[in-house]
Amino acid sequence: HAKANGRGRVEHFSDTLADAIADRARLENDLRDAVDNDDFALVFQPQICARTGSVVGAEALLRWRHPDGLRMPGNFIGRAEETGLIVEIGQWVTGTVAQTIARWADAGIGQRLAVNISARQIDHVSFFRSLRQALRDADAPASLLELEITENLAMTCSDDVLAAIAALRDDGASVAIDDFGTGYSNLARLRRLPVDRIKLDHSMIRNVADTAEARTIAQAVIALIHGIGCTVVAEGIENEAEADVLRVIGCDILQGYAIGEPMAEAEFIDWMREGNRRLIA
Ligand code: C2E
Ligand code: MG
Ligand code: MG
Ligand code: MG
């Protein structure tokens, strides 16, 4: 590329900027088409009890079935939030989660299923109405639904949103705070939130098996979370050493590649039926 002279550099920069703008426009168009065509899928990642190894639930994770292959949320959720398309995508997600809960309940599986909700969705007035409608339409018990909201959302959402979350919880749904340890928590607020579980972000647990400091911090955070009456989920567990330490320092629920990767529904059901207990001797 023409980097030697200034003019060349400017052109190069302009091309790159134009490309970036075109990429964003294309992504938005493709996303709109995907919404129109329901080109999405959910995969399911198991969560196990740290003590017994039994499966206690799963997290539903979104995938985009793009002509070029499956796309990960990191490549499109941000743009979906900026454009507001997340509202419609989120409706597809909650509708599909409700149907999945009902199907699993009928099959005698009865796993709790967690769904990720972003700030832009929950701020939308219709969110809680359409979520309840989705549960009714699918005939899915609210008790098998868990909402995951990020720490940042939990710290900044309005009292109206908190009241709506509390009402859903009164109906039996549970609530988890996601990505805990990546934001700024106010302990007084945390204690008053209508929350059942707190999910330690993988950055909080990454070195627990390697350094005494990381382990001490994780142990203190777990004790603190228990102190406010919540259970602790560790996410992003990648090896048995991490799982072992987390179990010893009191973590209640484990999730991560070392436990089970996100799987398509049929694969997830097989995984559970096989009673996979990779970490338990
Ligand atoms: P999250 O809710 O914190 O989900 C956990 C992410 O960690 C998932 O990435 C999961 O595949 C990945 N993960 C699981 N085990 C491991 C592990 O052992 N190591 C590492 N390094 N990662 C692991 P994924 O599926 O790419 O999703 C990324 C994020 O996108 C999610 O983070 C969530 O914030 C968002 N997201 C996913 N599905 C939805 C959805 O349906 N709606 C909304 N609004 N957001 C979603
Ligand atoms: Mg279209
Ligand atoms: Mg999550
Ligand atoms: Mg997370």
Image (cartoon, helix red, strand yellow):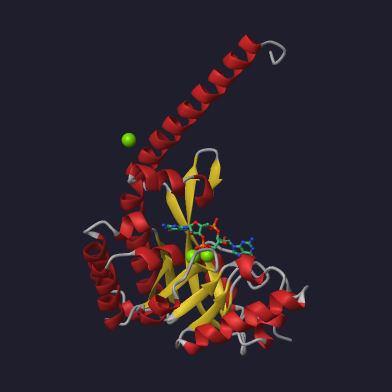
22 and 69: which is toward the camera: 22
In percent of width and height, residue 75 lies at: 52, 45
In percent of width and height, residue 213 lies at: 72, 76
43 and 217: which is toward the camera: 217
In percent of width and height, residue 23 lies at: 49, 30
Left/right of residue 267 with respect to residue 128 in the rendered view: right
User: In the displayed structure, would residue 52 be above or below residue 58?
Assistant: below
Which of the 4 image quarters holds residue 234? bottom right
User: In the displayed structure, would residue 128 be above or below residue 240?
Assistant: above
Quarter of the image that includes the C terminus: bottom right
Q: Residue at x 43, y 43 (%)?
A: 79
Quarter of the image that includes the N terminus: top right
191 and 38: which is toward the camera: 191
User: In the displayed structure, would residue 89 be above or below residue 12?
Assistant: below
Q: Residue at x 62, y 89 (%)?
A: 51
Q: Disc count in the image?
A: 0
In percent of width and height, residue 183 lies at: 50, 64
User: In the displayed structure, would residue 257 be above or below residue 187?
Assistant: above
Work out whether residue 143 can be spotted: yes
Q: Residue at x 32, y 46 (%)?
A: 84
